[in-house]
Image (cartoon, rainbow, N blue to C red):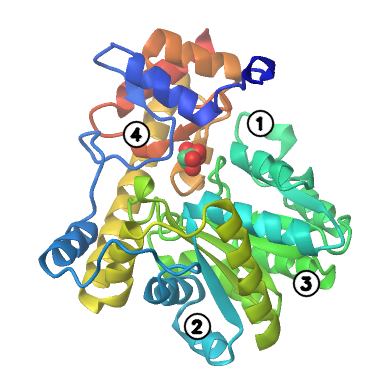
Amino acid sequence: MFENVPRAPEDSVFRIGRMFTECEDPLKVSCGIGAYRDNDGKPLVMDAVSEAKKRLHENPGWIHEYLPLGGHASFLKGAQKLALGDELYAEKSAEGKVGSLQTLSGTGALYVAGKMYSKFSPVKKALISNPTWGNHNAIFTNCGLEVSKYRYIDESCTSTPKLDLSGFLEDLEAADEGTLVLLQACAHNPTGVDPSQEEWMKVIEICVRKKLVVLLDNAYQGFATGDVEVDGFAIREFVKAGADIFVACSFAKNMGLYGERIGALHVVTNDKESCLDAVSQMKIISRTTYSNPPQFGALIADTILSDDKVYGVWKEQLAVMSERIKSMRGLLRGYLEAETGTDWSHITKQIGMFSYTGLTKEQCIHCREKGSLFMLETGRVSMAGLNEGNVERVAKVMAASIKG
Ligand code: LMR
């Protein structure tokens, strides 16, 4: 049978990662995959993660048994609290209107949500932003959904990307009732362009009125503003507006637990019975896909989320990381403006891990081939790959690609 299998294209993000690894230029810069690097360009193990691991090794009240199908119960409570905030968490959990499944990071959560929707919704349509993280389209197509896009970035200014709010709202208005709408809770990937709080309220009003099924992709809580509470705004306002929602959470970025594949899919419902029903079905999907989730990442995340001291250390370092990225935005913009004599203010207006630079595919390839700067060919730069030692050179490489 294998002779009939066609070769699949390489994933666009991991392809750039492979090319970076293979590149022998000592000046190479990795701005492809969204993974945090410190000011020396090194991967970072967060202090709270080191402390949690130390505790787990010194005092192992755990063994290598299977987790329950739903995952690690205490981790899930902590994850709910982080997403909803203390007050809403207390209210919704007391009423039995929030339920969760531990997932294989954010991607696993998106997949389970997409599968749930495709199994139980009479409508089989998903709406995602244009542009969005490349995997969104593939995941929902894989779930058997017809995927289309809502406008997000203003097409009239592609070299200085900004939100096309009216196009975005019009496309939500035009969606059929019951359509699954994927929204990114904060730090939009790939653009770094988020709606303001006022703009979010307009989005929420339409989604609720049009009875759209909302799935919030919450992969960067804490990375947008450095404050997990502020970054939880959209999730919390959707819940307050009375929407039934899915929230797909990842702890890859905000805890730096990329390879542990730790995430959660929450549902917030309007009654207790439907919450129990939804979680029961989410467990069936995980059981028939990968059975049950891995344990170690859940133990680390649980230690961070359930211990006040470790939680405080985590939040503080997250703010420092987000601040470092912000300072790179300022430096990159300054050097680019000096090199090109044009406006690069979109770099400092965008937030989170990524910048949508406005560079064309040809210019991105030029950056890679002539300057060993590895970014996605859509013009997305992972700002976390920049540091004081390479940012000026990166700006020069980008500027040279524009001059041709
Ligand atoms: C990214 O967008 O670079 C990350 O979310 C990693 C991935 O899985 O694509």
**Gap in Å between the C-alphas at discs 1 and 4?**
23 Å
Q: Nearer the viewer, residue 189 or 101?
A: 101
Image location (x, y in percent) of residue 243? 71, 75
Residue at the image point whose x is 87% and y is 62% from the top? 122
Real-space CA distance between mark 2 and mark 3, rounded to the nearest whole angstrom: 21 Å
Q: Which residue is mark 1?
A: 158
Q: In the shown orientation, is residue 243 left or right of residue 343? A: right
Q: Earlier in the sequence, mark 4 or mark 2?
A: 2
Quarter holding residue 235 = bottom right
Image position, residue 301 (x, y; %): 33, 64
Rounded to the nearest angstrom, the CA distance separating label 3 from label 4 is: 38 Å
Name which residue lies at 59% across and 91% down. Answer: 95
Pointer 1: residues within 10 angstroms few (<14), some, or many (20+)? some
Q: Nearer the viewer, mark 1 or mark 2?
A: 2
N-terminal of the two: label 1 or label 2? 2
**In this rendering, which labeled residue sits more in front, label 1 or label 3?**
3
Total numbered labels: 4
Is the CB–ligand 1 distance for label 2 below 8 Å?
A: no
Q: Amino acid at mark 3?
A: Val
Residue that numbered label 3 is attached to? 208
- Say whether disc 3 or disc 4 marks the residue closer to the N-terminus: 3
Q: Which residue is mark 4?
A: 385
Q: Earlier in the sequence, mark 1 or mark 3?
A: 1
In which quadrant will I find the N terminus? top right
Q: Are marks 1 and 4 in contact (CB under 8 Å)?
A: no
180 relative to 149, above or below: below
Tag 1: amino acid: Thr
Residue identified by numbered label 2: 89
Question: Is the residue 273 above or below the residue 172 in the image?
Answer: below
Of circles 4 and 2, which is in front? 2
Closer to us: mark 2 or mark 3? 2
